[in-house]
Amino acid sequence: VIFALYQEHGTTIRGLIDKDYVGISDIQEALLEFHDVDLSDVRPASGLREMIESVKKRRFIFTASIREHAERCLERLGIEDLFEDIIDAHACEYYSKHSDHAFKTAMQIAGAEHHFQCILLDDSMRNITTAHHLGWHTVCVGMKDRN
């Protein structure tokens, strides 16, 4: 059943919501608990701040996670002040990050009127593919696709 929800709705959470198995408030509480993980091994990377600061455009975090988890990670990395906002799973109504809906929501939140105004740096080729299909500029980060 769980995998069928994932296949039909893009994420299991979206499927649970669409089928009225759980409410949004239940999801929010559960995700806060699920993301309460030890981040002691997350440390600032040499040159990361400077690299991000060199991007002279508006910067947002677009995550499939929740805002609270992203904030904790950014704080651990020492770069929480470099981004205007965090566009998280809740903001995208729990649609998968690789869905057209999530990207269109991200554009709306960021105030981007045209796809070509956006660039996605991501470690998932699935997310990169959706962004590219929608006309975003894309960069796959990391040594290889995480998938």
Image (cartoon, rainbow, N blue to C red):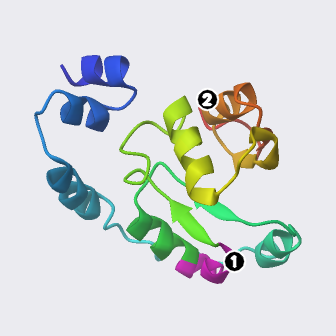
Segment colored magenta: 75-83
Left or right: 144, with 65 as reference point: right
Answer yes or no: is residue 99 visible: no
Q: Nearer the viewer, residue 49 or 61?
A: 61
Residue 68: x, y in percent?
39, 70
Answer yes or no: is residue 18 visible: yes
Assign the C terminus to one quadrant of the image.
top right
Asked if 4 appears above or below 139 in the picture, the reply is above
Q: Foreground mark, 2 or 1?
A: 1
Left or right: 73, with 145 as reference point: left
Residue type, label 1 = Leu
Q: Quick check: is 95 in the magenta stretch?
A: no
Q: Dot 2 lies on which element? A: helix
- Checking the image for residue 108, the label placed there is none
Q: Main secondary structure of the magenta part?
A: helix
Label 2 and label 1: CA atoms lie apart by 26 Å
Residue 124: x, y in percent?
63, 37
Q: Dot 1 lies on which element? A: helix
Q: Quick check: is 77 in the magenta stretch?
A: yes
Q: Nearer the viewer, residue 97 or 145?
A: 97
Q: Quadrant of residue 46?
A: bottom right
Q: Residue at x 35, y 66 (%)?
A: 37
Q: Would you name the residue on which mark 2 appears?
A: 126
Q: Residue at x 60, y 79 (%)?
A: 80
Residue 109: x, y in percent?
56, 56
Asked if 117 appears above or below 14 in the picture, the reply is below
Q: Nearer the viewer, residue 110 or 131?
A: 110
Q: Quadrant of residue 127?
A: top right
Q: Would you name the residue on which mark 1 appears?
A: 82
Q: Residue at x 77, y 77 (%)?
A: 49
